[in-house]
Image (spheres, rainbow, N blue to C red):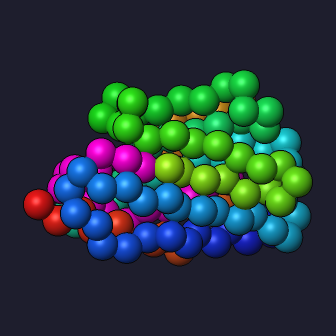
């Protein structure tokens, strides 16, 4: 079993910045791909960003390219999501997910373990 815990959510004004952190433990491996997804009220969960074990393969949703940066620390099996130039439409619950594969995917169905989520609210 892999345990996933997110932190760092909160309330921020439009144009501001926020950094989310995700820690994987238990039977987690630094080889696993990790990703961030978000879900706004009344909407389906959507892909935000993902990173492979080395950081050599990174994928972003078009809506966050140029504003969000994903990175990882394999010694601690943690992933950061640095968010800047935040917009009200970035509001939602942000989930960290672990995929028991080295290959990055953008579909939430391809991820095996999930955190409880952390709320991000961007006010206009």
Q: Is 31 colored magenta in this rendering? A: no
Q: Is residue 50 visible?
A: yes
- Residue 120 position within the rendered picture, expressed as x and y whole percent measured from the top left: 35, 67
Extreme-top residue of the structure: 56
Q: Name the quarter where the N terminus is drawn.
A: bottom right
- Residue 87 position within the rendered picture, expressed as x and y whole percent measured from the top left: 22, 50
Q: Using residue 116 as the reference point, say whether residue 4 is left or right of it.
A: right
Q: Name the quarter where the C terminus is drawn.
A: bottom left
Q: Is residue 109 visible?
A: no
Q: Residue at x 37, y 55 (%)?
A: 17
14 above or below 101?
Answer: below
- Residue 81 position within the rendered picture, expressed as x and y whole percent measured from the top left: 53, 51
Q: Residue at x 50, y 70 (%)?
A: 8
Residue segment shown in magenta: 83-101
Give whichever of 75, 106 is nearer the camera. Answer: 75
- Residue 7 position by quadrant: bottom right
């Amino acid at each position: 079993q892999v345990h996933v815990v997110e932190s760092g959510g909160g309330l921020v004004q439009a144009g501001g910045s926020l950094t989310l952190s995700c820690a994987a433990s238990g039977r987690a491996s630094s080889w696993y791909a990790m990703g961030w997804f978000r879900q706004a009220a009344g909407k389906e969960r959507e892909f935000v960003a993902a990173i492979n074990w080395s950081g050599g393969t990174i994928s972003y949703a078009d809506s966050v390219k140029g504003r969000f940066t994903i990175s990882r620390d394999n010694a601690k099996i943690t992933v950061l999501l640095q968010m800047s130039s935040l917009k009200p439409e970035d509001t939602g619950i942000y989930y960290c997910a672990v995929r028991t594969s080295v290959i990055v995917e953008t579909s939430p169905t391809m991820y095996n373990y999930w955190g409880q989520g952390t709320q991000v609210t961007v006010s206009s």
